[in-house]
Amino acid sequence: MMVSAKTIDDIRRALRGADCDTLVAFDCDEVLTTILEHACKGHSNRFFTEWCSRNATSCAERGIFDVATFILVSSENRLVDEKMPGIVKNLLEKKAKAVVLTALSTKPVADVHDPIAWRVATLNRLGYNFGDFWPSLADRRFDEFACEYPPAYSSGVICCGDVPKGEALLAFLKHSGAAPKKIIFIDDKMENLENVSAVCADVGIAFVGVEYVEADQMASNVHFSEKRIEFQLSTLREKRIWISDLEAEEHMSSANAIENIPYAAIEKLRKSPRTSAVSVP
């Protein structure tokens, strides 16, 4: 069963019947948290992919994913909806189980040496604590997946990386010993919902997929501009920093804008909680 959710009230309705036999899995980016940078929004996918193919060392999908991850960890993460942490807490009160199922890789990126710890800390700062659903469950790397950076679990968060979300979720169920009769999965991408739906069908677990698109309506404080995104990505490549939409607007108006960003400004950006020194793949 698949349903569409455009608002937080739709999410509340989808979770109304969750109980002790239910596992609710939440995607993170664009469901629990978001960044407002135009470069990472759906309307920029074509331009972003083309730029990465032209400029990243690797034109493979992995290179594009790495650049997007650099932007994610270097930007200000915020709530998609301020009511969502309360909805998650309500699941705990109803004795349902909940877990985060994110495509974030366990591969170190930028100055984030432990991505899953970064993800847990970011969620905690925004009012989520999925570890409360699994208070005695040990952290685990799922080394049974033959990949350089396998999925991992910590404090209520599963980082899947290159492994399909359904397969990573099954590995988590085995690790946790959880045996839900129903799984409700909330994600902004239909292909992820379909993947988990197929896995649930294979193992006989009832499934409800919720395509949540509220974050699509959230906008940056500045207009969409391919020219500005190209400036941001070029600055990332040449200066090893990610600058926000607003910062890009401030610096891109002059000729040779990247070269003319003063050293003091670069150091300020590097030290900002919204930016990080990075190396482009």
Image (cartoon, rainbow, N blue to C red):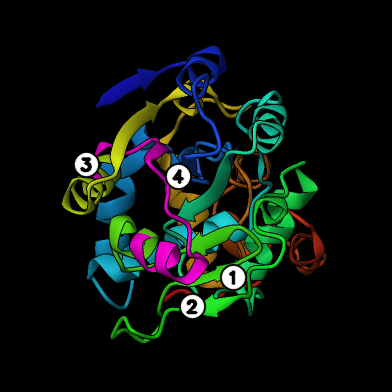
Residue at the disc numbered 4: 40
The residue shown at (79%, 58%) is: 272
- Secondary structure, mark 4, is helix
Q: Nearer the viewer, residue 203 or 122?
A: 203
Q: Nearer the viewer, residue 167 or 247?
A: 167
Query: In 3D space, how far apart are the residues under numbered discs 2 and 4 (Cα atoms)?
Result: 19 Å
Residue at the disc numbered 3: 194
Indicate whether 273 appears above or below 11.
Answer: below
Q: Amino acid at mark 3?
A: Glu
Query: In 3D space, how far apart are the residues under numbered discs 2 and 1 (Cα atoms)?
Result: 7 Å
Residue at the disc numbered 1: 115
Query: On the rendered image, what quadrant is the C terminus found in?
Result: bottom left
Q: Position of residue 279 (x, y in %)?
A: 52, 77
Q: Nearer the viewer, residue 112 or 194?
A: 194
Q: On the picture, is 256 further left or further right than 119?
A: left
Q: Evaluate if marks 4 and 1 touch, with contact meaning CB atoms under 8 Å apart.
A: no
Q: Amino acid at mark 1?
A: Pro
Residue at the disc numbered 2: 107
Q: Amino acid at mark 4?
A: Cys
Residue extent of the magenta highlight: 170-191
Q: Evaluate if marks 2 and 4 touch, with contact meaning CB atoms under 8 Å apart.
A: no
> If you read the primary sequence from the N terminus, does the residue marked by circle 2 or circle 1 appear first?
2
